[in-house]
Image (spheres, rainbow, N blue to C red):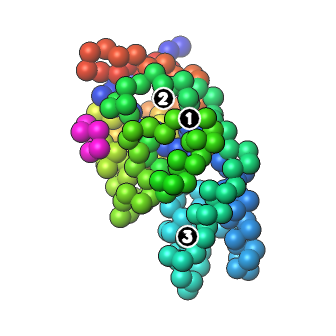
Amino acid sequence: MISTFTCHAILFDLDGVLVDSTAGVSRVWGRWAREHNLEPQHVIDTAHGRRSIETLRLVAPRIDAAAENIRVEAMEIADTEGVIALPGAANMLRSLAPERFAVVTSATRALASARLKHAGIEVPANVVAADDVVNGKPHAEPYLKGAELLRIAPADCIVFEDTPSGIAVARAAGMRAIGLRTTYSADKLTEAVAVVGSLAEVRVAVEGELLRIDL
């Protein structure tokens, strides 16, 4: 059965939607946590879907977060082992006009660019990164900024997200979200309007001013 949605623009989360960087994130944050005598899995879980500066403030409020953030970012940029494009991601972005989509990520611009390039995906013209917003996810600001960048009303955007918190952020921004089962099972993504395995299961066609999304 095919489900169809229409919109004027698409916003893509990066990690878990376009690229798989889970192993690298776990390695870097696990090592950092052990260096600071913190429980590694708790730090890793906190880091997913958040800007690194906010992760640091949450897990270690007494440290110099700004200084540590520079170090963590350098560690993440250097650790590219296992960073790969997820199925359908590169083809999907190539099929869309640059002004019809944006990547919205909790990674910094430098880190997002490094991951995309390592995965063999061209860095798109429109990116909202951690250094472009005051409040990162789970605040709605990043997705609202993505819509503003494209000059599209939030209600006319569809978001592709892989986490329950990311889907909640999209909904808070007044957008519909399609969930990907790359990180969580479908039963955890119940706030999405639909759930697919990957972007390989998605087809997008241009119909005048609209984009038609077939799942």
* Three-letter amino acid code at the position of disc 1: Ile
In this picture, residue 214 sits left or right of residue 21: left
* Three-letter amino acid code at the position of disc 3: Ile
* Three-letter amino acid code at the position of disc 2: Leu
Q: Mark 1 near mark 2, Cβ–Cβ under 8 Å? A: yes
Tell me which segment is drawn in magenta.
148-155
User: Is residue 149 within the magenta segment?
Assistant: yes
| Label 1: how many Cα within 10 Å (few below 14, some 14–19, many 20+) | some
- Residue at screen point 70% across, 55% down: 79
Q: Which residue is mark 1?
A: 121
- Front: mark 1 or 2: 1
| Label 2: how many Cα within 10 Å (few below 14, some 14–19, many 20+) | many
Q: Which residue is mark 3?
A: 70
- Residue at screen point 26% across, 15% down: 208
Q: Secondary structure at mark 3?
A: helix
Indicate the position of residue 89 as horizontal and vertical percent values.
56, 30
- The CA span between labels 2 and 3 is 30 Å
Residue 138: name its quadrant: bottom left
